[in-house]
Image: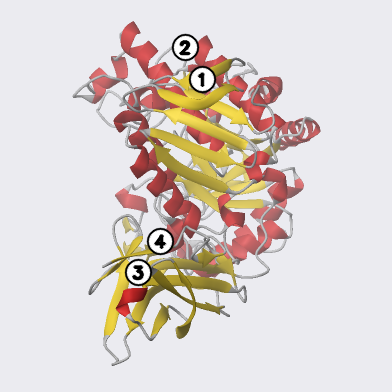
Amino acid sequence: MRLPFQSRDTRYKRPFGAVATGQTVEIDFPVPASLGADHVNLVVRGDFSLTVVLAYTRTDGDFAVFSGAFSLPKSGVYFYRFEIVMPDGIMHFVGKDEQGKAISGDWLPEWQLSVYDADYRTPDAFKGGVIYHVFVDRFHRIPDGRTPRFGYLKQWNEDVTIADADGIYRANDFFGGNLQGIRAKLDYFLSLGVTALYLSPVFEAASNHRYDTADYTRIDPLLGTDEDFRALTEEAKAKGISVILDGVFNHTGADSIYFNKFGHYPSLGAYQSVDSPYYNWYSFSHFPDRYACWWGVTVVPSIRRDALSFQDMIAGEDGVIDRWCRLGAAGWRLDVVDELSMPFVKRLRLAAKRNDALLIGEVWEDASTKYSYGERREYFYGKELDGVMNYPFRTAILHYVLEGDARMFADEIMTIVENYPKPALDCSMTLIGTHDTVRILNRLAPIETPATKWERLHYRMPEDAYLESVERVKLAATLQFVLPGIPTIYYGDECGMEGFEDPINRRPYYVGSESLLAYYRRLGALRRQYRDDFCADTEVYADAGVAIIRRGKLTAFVNAGKSDYELDAPMRDLLGGKTVSVVEKGKAVLIRSGEER
């Protein structure tokens, strides 16, 4: 038996999506009147469980409507189902089908209800903006005579190294991108509508990616100085751009003042002695050569989840978070946040909030139901993160652009919109590419991926494939910019840089497509002009293969389907600046209520 109830339809559940603790949830549950039901039980289970009796309130056509309301006093992730109770006590159990619609049967999936603390607040200053993700060594270099401590400095027009002569990749090829180089490009960021820069790690480290921190209190000398960082944040702030740092707090470098495996530092490192003040930060199975490290990578030994003195150094008063916020950092992205203990993440939030800073976590799955280390994470309950890197949106965008299934796209997007508290969704990164993924241009290209890494390094797309992929990236970028969250541009994606997996996706910045760059600039300008609309609620649905997204007064029609799509009337397209009556296959149109002509 199929039933009308749909959790995303406010005729049946109000309000839409996640709710705050103590907030009233109203349910109207239609049942065929011919069934003769006595009442309906709403069964809610989670950290706090209850059964709500829905009583008959009215008849609506062929349906008897049973209604009730409830609230939940404790934050968490809850699940609910219905029981249609007959006069003789027989029950019909109701769950949801694959489309989220109500159906009777046994052992069916339940609906999710996310509940967050009523006092949960996230920074309004970032909402509706645009983030630009800078991989610092590869973005822009102002020559200053500095050279790396180890490894070698390459010319900007050279390609990246995928392995040394012995076949081992050491991430020791540097191109010299630096903080002065970023500062010199602030007007470029403004031309893209950027309101925040997310920098790859900037603290001293042995590698070019710097996820192997050597000293949390020092800017890597190849990048500049504390004063260079302060100058960047101050000038950026004057132009309306915030700076977000990458917090790598799950592991350090083996070549660091803390571990000091190679003796490059004057400190007594954990690798050198059990008497080191840092020894208890790490886990040794056989001292000193066998120790826990991130994914078995020995150059990044893992920090123990219960290393309180490490947590004090990072999140305590006058610790690392405070230090860099005083120098101008306005936010932090937490690397592999699911590896950090929940008490530590809560401390990091306290440290961020005493500095009015944003706190975003790297999460690849639906963060509202994320499990790690045997426990459900509490990212969005109100005492941890402001937002996450929204990889599920990326998955949905790529699948739609490549396959054209608008209904699946709408369902995947609305699942996240429904599960995430709006304060968290508005502060999450909406992304289509990062330093950990294949370049978006390659991911969407009509090409066969070369078999070997050497071939992938030297591969360049044929012109026809390149141009076709540019048009697909425009579609993906349109979705990225109109969906909720903060669109986050991985450096070079806006101008058609090529590259497969890392480190091939980390080449020195270059402009490959002026057409694509102009399109991104148009998206950024619209984002800035209609910022309030991009902070509004979201509705996504499908029609004839077209994804339709409503945000405030804006409506986007994105056509990755198999045929052109006719609009109800000629309308002015904000993307192209022309009046159109058809959304062509492979194109997008953005209109605004009141500006249709």
Kindly identify the residue that appears in the image at 37 percent across and 18 percent down: 469
- Outermost residue to the top: 463
Q: Which residue is mark 4?
A: 370
Looking at the picture, does residue 289 appear above or below residue 79?
Answer: above
Looking at the image, can residue 253 be seen? yes
Provide the secondary structure element on which disc 4 rests.
loop
Q: Few, some or many C-alpha atoms within 10 Å of disc 2 (few <14, some 14-19, many ≥20)? A: some
Quarter of the figure that contains the N terminus: bottom left
Q: Amino acid at mark 2?
A: Gly
Q: Position of residue 593 (x, y in %)?
A: 65, 34
Looking at the picture, does residue 56 appear above or below residue 541?
Answer: below
Q: Which residue is mark 2?
A: 512
Nearer the N terminus, badge 1 or badge 3?
A: 3
Provide the secondary structure element on which disc 3 rests.
loop
Q: Few, some or many C-alpha atoms within 10 Å of disc 1 (few <14, some 14-19, many ≥20)? A: some
Mark toward the viewer: 4 or 1: 1
Look at the numbered discs 3 and 4 and tell me whether their residues touch, using CB distance below 8 Å. Answer: no
464 relative position to 78: left or right: left
Q: Position of residue 506 (x, y in %)?
A: 43, 26
Q: How is the image coloured?
A: secondary structure
Looking at the picture, does residue 94 appear above or below residue 128?
Answer: below
Q: Which residue is mark 1?
A: 581
